[in-house]
Amino acid sequence: MTYRLKFPVSSLPSLALLLLACTQSLQLSKDDSKVVLAQQTLDAPNPGDAGPFNVRTLYYGSGTDKRRTYYRDSVKIKTKAVDGSAFVAMDPPEARDRKKHWGFDTKHFPLNGRVWYPEGDGPYPLVLVVHGNHNPDDYSDPGYKYLGELLASRGFILVSVDENFINGGLRNESDGRAWLLLEHLRAWKAFTDSSANPFHAKVDWNNIGIMGHSRGGEAVGHAAAFNRMARYPDDANVKLGYNFNIRAVVAIAPVDAQYKPAGQFEPLENVNYLVIHGSHDGDVSTFHGLRQFNRLKFTDGNLWFKSAIYVYRANHGQWNQVWGSTDNGPTSARFLDLRGLISQEEQRQFGRVVIGGFLEATLHGRKEYLPMFVDHRTIGAWLPKTMYLTRFQENTFKALATFDEDVDVTTGSVAGVTISGDSLSTWKEANLPFRWTNEVMNTNAVWLGWNNKIAGDDTTKRGKPARFTVSISDSLSNALALNERSVVMLSLAPTNDAPGPRKSAADSAKNDSTKKDSAKAAPKKAPAPPKKKAEKDTTPVDLTVELEDRDGVVARLPLSAFGVPRRPLDVHVLRRAGREKQNFRNPFELVPQTYVMPVADFQRSAPQFSPSRLRAIRLVFDRLVAGTVIVDDIGVANPDPAFLAHAIRAVMK
Amino acid sequence: MRFLTLALLSALCAGATELRAQGKATAPLVLRLPASVRALSLGNVNVASSNDDVIFYNPAQLAVARAASLSLQRFSGGSIAGALSTAMAFNNGGIGIGAQWASFDASAPLPFTPANVTQQGGLAAASASATIGMAQVIRGLRVGAAGKVAEEIAGTERSLTVLGDVGVGKDTRLFNFGAAVRNVGASYRSTTGARIPPPTRLTVGAQAGRPLAVIWPSMSPFIDVGAAAEVTVLRDGWIKPAAGLELGYAWIEGYSFLVRGGVRRPELGERPMTAGASLVADRLRIEYALEPREGGTLSHRFGLRIR
């Protein structure tokens, strides 16, 4: 018997259309890296290149691991298991399964680590790196080999800490991840104190660094805080009291606040901090680490700095050699648009350069690497060719307007500061939103929208450029004690919105929004032009920054002289059309770029300008007819000169 | 995996030998016919499934089934069978309702056999049932029960009976297991006075499905594989192994195309091999199954499922 099946060939095009219809096209912002990264003013050796030390490796561990022989049979140094039951909770079936799988329970967590270390006597800074959540059987700790080899060759001891046994479906275990890191440090103290140990006296205990990826990135924040606490906030019967000299904290694509000590966001202070995040992160798809960045305060007068770098087209996993490009597991290609990613090697090269430079600057005291965190354009030749948005702050920063202190838009963050706006279409303060729906950065910023075009038939008619002024009282100006080595700083993110044309009658020149009588001064109201829906504009955003002293001398430079003000970078991580809208608030992340503007550059443009008599910092929206920007953290600083040693000199355009 | 492999092999062997020991009359007929397109294409294996039409195979799995579906099967000679079902969450589990029917021209009076649906006769006949089921999860074990009313019509003769199913289900990391006893109840009496027992059967089975890349990371991330197998013991002790394989191509989240094949030890009227395909477009699933029947005829079953 024969069965005949007819397949209608004519239906093939329809089928192909169906296959393609639900896939969206690749959407990326136009790359400007050839221009932005065209320079290399920092002339130190590339911190992403291998250093002079021969690299050796070994494993240490508790020897109880059922799964991995290298943590059972190959350990060179035996560690005692630790009781993590106060930090990591699981229900009885889960606990049973895990004990059966790994060979130990929460009361007997092993201290396992793989070490890359330089050959020599030391002492060397000790850096721990801890992975985040991932398939527990796809062991994550080998994934930082590229950092281990680099850092050890440059005179650091790098330990990749094994926390695979708390990976998988656990929740609220980030404090446990942090505590385990500190327990590793305690074990290392014992190593270096023991004369029989291969690491005896080889660790520089004044320079300790901790790094974490994903949940590990959250954990390093908790670890830095726990390190200085006497007792565990959620159970004071558990003693902490580590007090290691942790000077450097690196968070790689971290989550934030999955654990909140005592129900609060983890406070963080007085450490050097670096957070990096990829725009195309398919797991932590928002720059959550900015919250940790914002919470970090410098209070003790020592030299500290913090830096946040948003890497366009980088993902979550490529900073780990095991995780790779599949942020959503082995079937990621069904969910995530992987076409836009930079290569794994490029992403890791970025990690080598930036993490290497950060640890050199903070743990080896190599100040020549500080400028790369002030302005990434100084290392254009070292960075993979993609786009970056950076935040920066150091310990001398004095905030004038952070927009967090109250709900009065005319007051600044310190006494003596008043804020005014002129001819602004939008002037409001609000919490900065994350790309993730319902999540905010927990920091306010100001939205400034303008349209210098006057409504009417004459399309060439322009009003006085809109402006936003932060005025400083004489006494405050004196207290700030600015000089030619000082800098003015602000963080700014252009948006895609542009308000409609300005009303012709309510012109500008006299329309200072802060003046109560401005309404009286206006002639009879003309009928309001219909409100236009904001349209996406692709023209480059720029504005003029003016510094005015008490004598009325004004020094001005374009903002673009200090960095590129980019419109939001398009981010589409999901493959299926429409999913992006369903899952995220915006198809972009609002990352305000920090502009560090040396006063000396302004003085060059107006030699009579006197920084010590600064009266006002003004943003003049005269370089683009209409637009909206978000501004945060306006302030001044007197940074260590090393930060500005290789600054790209700003010139009037 | 060993269970699935063994069941698959035994089903293949049994299918190849085409033993037909199962010949004792049971009724109603509709409860011996396939009730699910996917199941049919997998050799009518469905005891561990989580689709809504599992109400006809194992009520315990209603605890995880969430969908509604309709399917129709056309046999040679114009006979038609169909099934309609829906399942939803309820308390710590789920509830479902379903209906099955078959209409055909019988060549002989009651009791019918599955062969009747492909044999043209002069007697207008129908067989139908309505089922309601519920499942709850008790200490990690799914437990379910279903009650059904079934009626057989042959010309002017009508017989009604009430039957019940019970089942259990359990998932492990790799497999979904299910077991059910179906069609338990009193024999019904035909108008001629004959007592005809219901098609009571005990089925134990398992299924598993994974993206291929989860099993072998080097493989394509777009391919899914699945397997299902079960062993059924009929009322008269006749043992029927069956198994099926499923291969899917999911080119983007929510969309996939699947092909299936099944093998079983055939009952009367059946052939050992079945096959099918399915197109999944987000919440909608279009299903097709091909069932060669005894006598060299082909029967086609189409279905729609909305999740």
Image: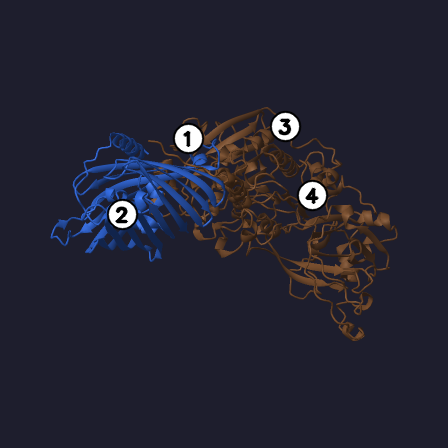
Chain colours: A brown, B blue
Residue A27 lies, in percent from the top left, at: 63, 44
Q: Which mark is in front, 2 or 1?
A: 2
Q: Which circle's residue, 4 or 1, is located before the other in the chain?
A: 4
Using a 10 Å C-alpha cutoff, classify the residue at mark 2 as few (fewer than 14 neighbours), some (14 to 19) or many (20 or more).
many
Distance Cα–Cα, label 4 vs label 1: 46 Å
Please say whether residue B138 is visible from this viewpoint: no
Distance Cα–Cα, label 1 vs label 3: 30 Å
Q: Indicate which disc residue A50 carries.
A: 3
Please say whether residue A3 is visible from this viewpoint: yes
Distance Cα–Cα, label 4 vs label 3: 33 Å
Considering the numbered disc 4 on the image, is that residue within a helix, a strand or a loop? loop
Considering the numbered disc 2 on the image, is that residue within a helix, a strand or a loop? strand
Marked residue chain, label 2: B
Q: Mark 1 sits on what residue?
A: A68
Discs 2, 1 touching: Cβ within 8 Å: no
Q: Which mark is in front, 2 or 3?
A: 2
